[in-house]
């Protein structure tokens, strides 16, 4: 197993397909079905930004997963303190490689990045219907500290 940083937006775009299709199936009113060209254009336009980090997970010379991270610096104000976090936008492992510890190994790598950058907070969110994500992050020690709610009118 090997984890490395990448700026190969084409590979990331292909690996995004199961994530996008899951979101589109759970919340079709919010998400487009996966469209490679649109996703590729999106990642191509932002992959070299210094605030984003993309990780590739490889097993036996095959790419089996990825993580999309963002270094976020939150300014302080009269109400909130200044802090920096690593925000996990997406973690995905191909279905045939799931439940074998690969996602946890990606998280461990992310923790090392945070430690090397003196960042003590990892943040993320997931859609409520994505129970697999909820279980995975709970199993890996993530705690709920904020809820996002809505009302349709």
Image (cartoon, rainbow, N blue to C red):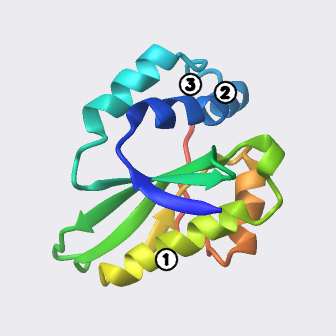
Q: Earlier in the sequence, mark 3 or mark 1?
A: 3
**Is 70 displayed left or right of 94 in the figure?**
left
Q: What percent of the width, then of the height, locates residue 84? A: 29, 73
How crowded pointer 3 is (Cα within 10 Å; few <14, some 14-19, many 20+) is rated as some
Give me the residue at 64% from left, 33% from top.
Answer: 23
Q: Is residue 103 above or below residue 16?
A: below
The span from disc 1 to disc 2 (Cα, nearest Å) is: 28 Å
Q: Nearer the viewer, mark 2 or mark 3?
A: 2
Q: In front here: 113 or 87?
A: 113
Residue 102: assigned label: none
Give me the residue at 27% from left, 77% from top.
Answer: 83
**Is 91 displayed left or right of 95 in the figure?**
left
Q: Earlier in the sequence, mark 1 or mark 2?
A: 2
Residue designated by label 2: 21
Residue designated by label 1: 111
Q: Secondary structure at mark 2?
A: helix
Q: Nearer the viewer, mark 3 or mark 1?
A: 1
């Amino acid at each position: 197993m090997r984890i490395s940083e990448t700026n190969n937006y084409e590979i990331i775009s292909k690996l995004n397909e199961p994530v996008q299709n899951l979101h589109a199936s759970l919340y079709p009113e919010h998400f487009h079905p996966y469209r490679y060209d649109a996703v590729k254009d999106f990642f191509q336009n932002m992959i070299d930004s210094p605030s984003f980090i993309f990780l590739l997970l490889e097993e036996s010379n095959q790419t089996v997963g990825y993580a999309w991270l963002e270094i976020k610096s939150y300014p302080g104000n009269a109400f909130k303190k200044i802090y920096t976090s690593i925000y996990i936008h997406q973690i995905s492992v191909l279905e045939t490689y799931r439940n074998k510890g690969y996602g946890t190994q990606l998280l461990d790598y992310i923790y090392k990045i945070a430690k090397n950058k003196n960042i003590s907070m990892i943040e993320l969110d997931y859609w409520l219907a994505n129970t697999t994500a909820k279980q995975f992050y709970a199993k890996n020690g993530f705690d709920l500290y904020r809820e996002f709610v809505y009302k349709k009118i």
